[in-house]
Structure formats: structure tokens, C-alpha cells
Image (cartoon, rainbow, N blue to C red):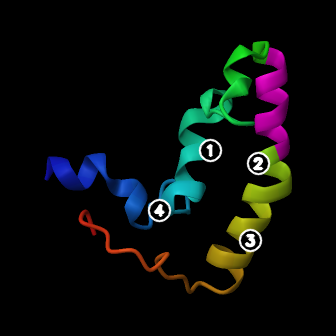
Amino acid sequence: MIINEKTKKYRYDPETGSDGTFGENYILYKEFLPLFGYKSIYYPKELRRKHYENIIELFWKPFQEEVFIKSKTWFTCGDLCNVA
């Protein structure tokens, strides 16, 4: 179903080993994800790329390790999700 394909970030995705907004957006949008109150859109691409690499290394990878690899248990943020 097309809806399931286009909204797979709201469920666990075996391709990325993650799910949810935090788990999927950084992998999908990379240096194009706005940071610092959207001021990062004016930064040079090299600086945006460096921020992206730091976020992946310092936040995303530890998040993946703790939530998806070690515990293998996770839950939603608690808000009702129309897609799920």
C-alpha cells in the first residue's frame, strides 16, 4: 500500500534499523535538516555536513545502540499517530 510505503518512518524500518522522527529524519535528510532555529540553511554545505556527522556520531548512534540494539524494546511518544 502506498500510504504504508510513504509513512514507514513511523514504524520500525529494517533497512535503517530505526524508526520515528529522530531515527529516520537524520538518515534521510542528512545535512539538509534545519538546525539552530533554521539558521543552518544559510551555513556553507561543509559546515552543515560537519554538524550532521557530529549529530550522527554523538546522538543518533548511541540512540540506536540503546533503543534498538540493546533493549530491542521501544514505544511511541504517546501522541496518537494517524498513520500507525
Q: Mark 3 points at which residue?
A: 65
Residue 40 vs 84, above or below: the answer is: above
User: Crowdedness of circle 4 by 10 Å Cα count: few (<14), some, many (20+)?
Assistant: few
Q: What residue type is labelled 4?
A: Pro
Along the polypeptide, which appears first: circle 1 or circle 4? Answer: 4
- 72 with respect to 10 (left or right): right
Along the polypeptide, which appears first: circle 3 or circle 2? Answer: 2
- Image quarter where the C terminus lies is bottom left
- 1 with respect to 77 (left or right): left
Alpha-carbon span between mark 3 and mark 2: 12 Å
Front tag of 4 and 3: 3
Front tag of 3 and 2: 2
Front tag of 2 and 4: 2
Quarter where residue 11 is shown: bottom left
Determine whether label 3 and label 2 are within 8 Å by CB: no
Residue 52 vs 5, above or below: the answer is: above
Look at 85% across and 30% down and name the residue there. Answer: 50
Disc assigned to residue 56:
2
Alpha-carbon span between mark 2 and mark 4: 18 Å
Q: What residue type is labelled 2?
A: Ile
Q: Residue 78: where, in percent of width, then height?
A: 44, 80
Q: Mark 1 points at which residue?
A: 26
Q: Mark 4 points at which residue?
A: 14
Q: What stretch is highlighted in magenta?
A: 46-54
Front tag of 1 and 3: 1
Q: Residue 46: where, in percent of width, then height?
A: 82, 17
Alpha-carbon span between mark 1 and mark 4: 16 Å
Residue 76 vs 35, above or below: the answer is: below
Q: Is mark 1 on a helix, strand or loop?
A: helix
Alpha-carbon span between mark 2 and mark 1: 8 Å
Alpha-carbon span between mark 1 and mark 3: 16 Å
Determine whether label 2 and label 4 are within 8 Å by CB: no
